[in-house]
Image (cartoon, grey):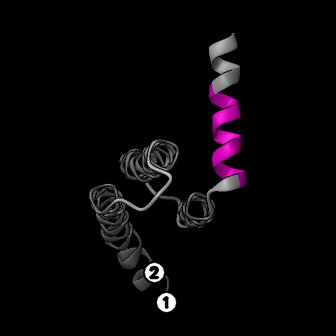
Amino acid sequence: MNTFLSACRGIVSLCKIEKNFRIHIFCSSLVIILGLIFSVSFVDWCILFVVIGNVLILEGINAALEALADVLYPRFDPHVGRIKDMMAGCVLISACMALVVGCLIFIPKIIVAF
């Protein structure tokens, strides 16, 4: 039970401290609302939740590793800066792939609706 509560505290911390995590939560909420509006299929829901989860997980890992790097290297270090940039790049790739998946799922439904 303690590990579950610790995990919940971690999620709450991400939501409170990390602006980008809140942005991803907001975008994920919009996708879920669109999924409900357009009654996406079971398979589409599975795909959407996998890509949403992937983005949120990577953002959480990115935030945790950046915080760890800041504690270990409080002064700017170009090597640490490069590592942070690479982590942010991975989140960006994941978010772009999620956007592509969302477009593939929702654009045909939007076209049919209008």
Which residue carries the number 2 mark?
110
Q: Residues within 10 Å of mark 2 (few under 14, many from 20)?
A: few
Magenta region: 7-16
Q: Are marks 2 and 1 in contact (CB under 8 Å)?
A: yes
As drawn, 46 above or below 33: above
Circle nearer the viewer, 2 or 1: 2
Please state, as top left, top right, bottom left or bottom right, where the N terminus lies in the image. Answer: top right
Query: Percent position (x, y) of residue 74?
Result: 50, 52
| Quadrant position of residue 92 | bottom left
Q: Looking at this view, name the residue that lies furthest to the top.
A: 1
Residue 114 image point, x, y percent: 49, 89
Residue placed farthest to the front in the image?
A: 75
Please give the residue where the numbered disc 1 appears in the rendered image: 114
Q: Is residue 11 left or right of residue 62?
A: right
Question: Is residue 11 highlighted in magenta?
Answer: yes
Badge 1 element? loop
